[in-house]
Image (cartoon, rainbow, N blue to C red):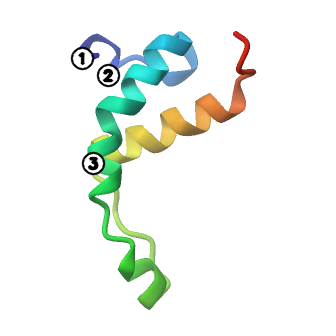
Amino acid sequence: MVAAMGKPVQRMTLPELRNELERTRPAWEAMDLDGVLAFDQLPVLDEDAHRHQLVANELLRRPSNG
């Protein structure tokens, strides 16, 4: 959902959040987390991976019945 990309996650509806989570999932899954375990350093997230993290956190924060 391209229209929601610039929208703050706090203002997105649950369907928008779910769509954005799916849209950004490939960037999140492409993250190389081996370096985190080997070197104890967090990787720099690209824009979509960071967006995925924000959306996932927002979905966890909200009640699921809304």
Q: Quadrant of residue 51?
A: top left
Q: Amino acid at mark 2?
A: Met
Q: Quadrant of residue 35?
A: bottom left
Secondary structure of the residue carrying numbered label 3? helix
Marks 1 and 3 sit apart, C-alpha to C-alpha, by 15 Å
Judge the density around disc 1: few (<14), some (14-19), many (≥20) Cα neighbours within 10 Å: few
- The quadrant the C terminus occupies is top right
The residue that label 3 is drawn on is: 27
Residue 57 in sight from this viewpoint: yes
Of pointers 3 and 2, the one earlier in the residue sequence: 2
Q: Name the residue rendered at 55%, 14% in the picture.
A: 14
x, y percent for residue 28 = 35, 51
Q: Amino acid at mark 1?
A: Val
In the picture shown, does residue 49 fall above or below 33? Answer: above
Q: Name the residue rendered at 70%, 24% in the picture.
A: 62
Compare residues 23 and 4 and report the one nearer the observer: 23
The residue that label 1 is drawn on is: 2
Number of the front mark, 3 or 2: 3
x, y percent for residue 54 = 50, 38
* Residue 31 badge: none
- The quadrant the N terminus occupies is top left
Compare residues 35 and 41 and report the one nearer the observer: 35
Q: Amino acid at mark 3?
A: Ala
The residue that label 2 is drawn on is: 5
Considering every residue shown, the one lying at the far bottom of the view is: 38
x, y percent for residue 3 = 28, 11
Q: Do residues under tags 1 and 2 come within 8 Å of each other at their CB atoms? A: yes
Residue 12 in sight from this viewpoint: no
- Left-right relation of 55 to 48: right
